[in-house]
Image: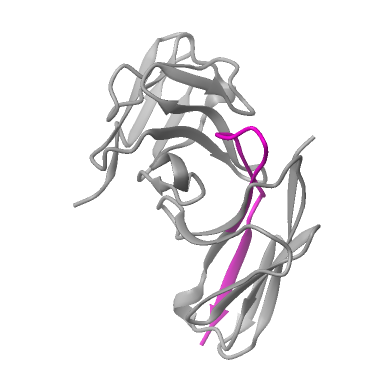
Amino acid sequence: EAQVTQNPRYLITVTGKKLTVTCSQNMNHEYMSWYRQDPGLGLRQIYYSMNVEVTDKGDVPEGYKVSRKEKRNFPLILESPSPNQTSLYFCASSPPDLINEQFFGPGTRLTVL
Amino acid sequence: EDQVTQSPEALRLQEGESSSLNCSYTVSGLRGLFWYRQDPGKGPEFLFTLYSAGEEKEKERLKATLTKKESFLHITAPKPEDSATYLCAVRGYQGGKLIFGQGTELSVKP
């Protein structure tokens, strides 16, 4: 089954404790992206990757890091989480010529205390 | 600055009551406007892509249209299963960057 998986699905942590949210897709897609979703603000793009070793900033990259060492994986790293990073995070992927038609993961709900 | 604004924020309809959702946008070098549906607790699901003014796409009770400044998602004779949040987004000249609107939460009552 074609899918995008995220782990963990739920996470409660404390300020400053480094964490990684993993994202993996089994569709051999070149393009992957991370979003955060907050009430009243909609989906906002954090980082995207057009292919392995190619990443670029979205609209809200501050406080986040990403890496793309393999085509299937695109982890999101929070080096020093803060409460304003409490949000619902989505990973998505697509073929490079169909970036509009992205497959989204199930989401990771992160709470930073 | 690229921007997408959706209205209304929430829309309540009776089953069978047709209506439209609006998506206004400003973007440098439009490379596509697209609509997604999002059910509570799930990731968005792709519905349509529109590339140029005058283009229309249909899927069941949904029809998306595009002008140079806005897009409409028309819902004809909606059913309760059409209840969801509908998201509009644009892709500009920066190839991989996408800008989403805040969404319209649609509720269809039987």
In front of the other: B8 or B30: B30
Residue A59 at what x, y percent from top left?
A: 64, 28
Residue A30 at what x, y percent from top left?
A: 37, 34
Residue in the picture at 70% in, 47% down: B30
Residue B14 vs A55, above or below: the answer is: below
Q: Is residue B87 left or right of residue B5?
A: left
Total marks shown come to 0
Name the quadrant containing residue B106.
Answer: bottom right
Residue B86 at what x, y percent from top left?
A: 57, 61
In front of the other: B101 or B107: B101
Query: Seen from this angle, which residue lies furthest left?
Result: A1
Residue A8 vs B89, above or below: the answer is: above
Task: Inspect the magenta stretch and tell me whether residue B49 lies in it.
Answer: no
Residue in the picture at 52% in, 82% down: B61
Q: Is residue A77 left or right of residue A22?
A: right
Residue B31 at what x, y percent from top left?
A: 64, 47
**Magenta stretch bounds:** B87-110
Residue in the picture at 37% in, 16% down: A19
In front of the other: B28 or B105: B28
Q: Is residue B33 left or right of residue B3?
A: left
